Amino acid sequence: MNIAIVHNVTEESKKVAKKLTTMLQKEAFNLVTSFPDIVISVGGDGTLLSAFHRYAHMLDSVRFIGVHTGHLGFYTDWREYSLDELVSSLKQDTGESVEYPLLDVEVKYRNSNEIKHFLALNEATIKRVDGTFVGDVYIREEQFERFRGDGLCVSTPTGSTGYNKSIGGAVLHPRLEALQLTEIASLNNRIFRTLSSPMVIAPDEWIKIKPIETDDFSLTIDQFVSNEEGVEHLEFRIAKERIRFARYQHTHFWNRVEDAFLGAKTKLNE
Ligand code: NAP
């Protein structure tokens, strides 16, 4: 089995990655950087996002594992003190995995035939800081509303606990096949009216956004930013690709949410 390890720059992550490398080599696993069967990220959710983008061209053949060196993350299951258990699970691997939806973003330009595609694990956002972003929002091919505000965010179920949550979006269970559209500081007055609440669309629907008046804006794909001009429209749909995690142990999703956002259990009767 070929294994790649991706870690962040903290001393703790470097130490854990080094220890894991030694343990895996002792068990005769091949440590590689190209064409891994398994990618192990050591760090936080941000590290897993980087690992995902590094290997996004080979999602059919790769599975991911997250070792967290900080607090419990959403993409990270393992701790540095359970590395023995992780290595023994890898030795007994039978290819088990759990997979989650990804977001496909298509950008079509006005004065060229060029079409760009991006794949996001968490979300894509359209943002403008220099004035407001104005755009027509379509669900499938039907116009739904005209948006004016700072921007819009389309997130995956696993990305719903990231930026989406900070802007008032709902937390979605990652087994749902859905995308969520969340507004970023929409203007609502007698002239501009938006739904003003997050929307969750069905698997066979897509969101189309046509910029109006505004020619330049930032498009973010997870941690990456692209400055766009001359965009005719953007389409957001569930990608045909999926991310697969090697699943040897399971943390219940709502326990993860509770641990990350609420901390110690709240005793309702106290
Ligand atoms: P960053 O700005 O260094 O860190 C953003 C924080 O978001 C980190 O604490 C990271 O967790 C956490 N995070 C990432 N994905 C998450 C998920 N699916 N659920 C819950 N928390 C998540 O950026 P980064 O580490 O490169 O990650 C980029 C992501 O950060 C974006 O995709 C976006 O979702 C999120 N973000 C959030 C805000 C906000 O909430 N206001 C602003 C910008 C970006 P770890 O500490 O475990 O790495």
Image (tube, grey):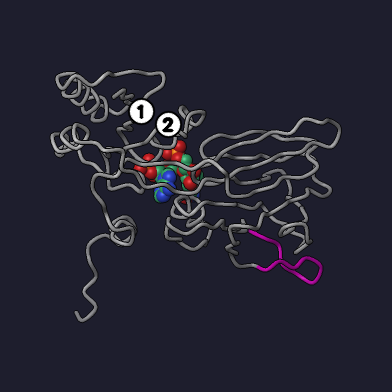
Left or right: where 123 falls relative to 218? left
Q: Position of residue 259 (x, y in %)?
A: 28, 57
Say which residue appears at 64% left-offset and 67% top-offset. Answer: 196
Inspect the magenta stretch and tell me whether residue 192 lies in it. Answer: yes
Q: Position of residue 249 (x, y in %)?
A: 23, 48
Q: Position of residue 240 (x, y in %)?
A: 56, 43
Q: Mark 1 points at which residue?
A: 37
Q: Name the residue under label 2.
A: 61
Say which residue appears at 74% left-offset and 34% top-offset. Answer: 115
The residue stretch that appears in magenta: 185-195
Say which residue appears at 26% left-offset and 38% top-offset. Answer: 94
Q: Do the residues labelled 1 and 2 touch (CB within 8 Å)?
A: yes
Placement of the C terminus among the 4 image quadrants = bottom left
Front one among 135 and 2? 2
Q: What element carries label 2?
A: loop
What secondary structure is the magenta-colored segment mainly? loop
Most distant residue in the bottom direction: 269
Left or right: where 60 falls relative to 225? left
Left or right: where 255 falls relative to 239? left
Q: How crowded is mark 1: few (under 14 residues within 10 Å), some or many (20 or more)?
A: some
